Image (spheres, grey):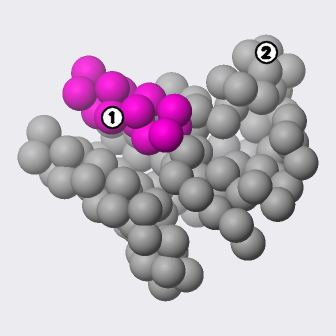
Amino acid sequence: MALKLNNPGYEHARRLVEHGRVVRDARTQWSEHHPSTQRENEFIDEHGVDEFARWYLAVDDQEAQGTKGRYKFPYGDFARVHRCAILSAEVRAGQYKHEAVELAAAHLHGMVDEAG
């Protein structure tokens, strides 16, 4: 997997946190809070893949452009950043040695906790 930091997604997340658009939930809640496949598809139909991509911290260059599979490490629900998603991304990126994504998630984690 050729993952790299999705800079537009990271910057979008930073702006959302700066504007207080955050859900301060527990790490274990992401499985309950993440958007369903149906919601993802509806979001793409309404806003397009480029806007969808802004809700992910990583891009997989081995996946085709314009596909959902190209984007990894979601951080929100298409309206707000979820602390649980940031924590999950930070841990998983660390496990799989995606250092740039791990550092970006750690920075966002710090921003969320400081603002809380």
Residue position marked by numbered label 2 in the rendering: 46
Residue 29, percent across and down?
46, 61
Binning the other alpha carbons within 10 Å of mark 1 as few (below 14), some (14 to 19) or many (20 upward) gives some
Q: Quadrant of the N terminus?
A: bottom right
The residue that mark 1 highlights is: 14
The label shown at residue 93 is none
Stretch of the chain drawn in magenta: 7-19
Type of the residue with mark 1:
Arg
Residue 54 lies, with reference to residue 64, above or below; the image says above
Queried whether the magenta region covers residue 17, the answer comes back as: yes
Residue 44 shown left or right of residue 13 in the figure: right
- Name the side, left or right, on which 17 lies relative to 60: left
Residue drawn at (78%, 21%) of the image: 48
The answer to whether residue 95 is visible is yes
From the image, give the main secondary structure of the stretch colored magenta: helix
Query: Looking at the image, is mark 2 or mark 1 earlier in the sequence?
Result: 1
Q: Is residue 84 visible?
A: no
Q: Residue at x 44, y 29 (%)?
A: 12
Within-10-Å neighbours for mark 2: few <14, some 14–19, many 20+: few
Left or right side of 14 for 114: left
Q: CA distance from mark 2 to mark 1?
A: 23 Å
Query: How far from the left and from the top, in percent, is residue 110?
Result: 19, 54
Camera-nearest residue between 97 and 105? 97
Q: From the viewer's perspective, is residue 67 above or below residue 80?
A: below
- Judging from the image, what secondary structure is the residue with disc 2 in? helix
Residue 18 lies in quadrant: top left
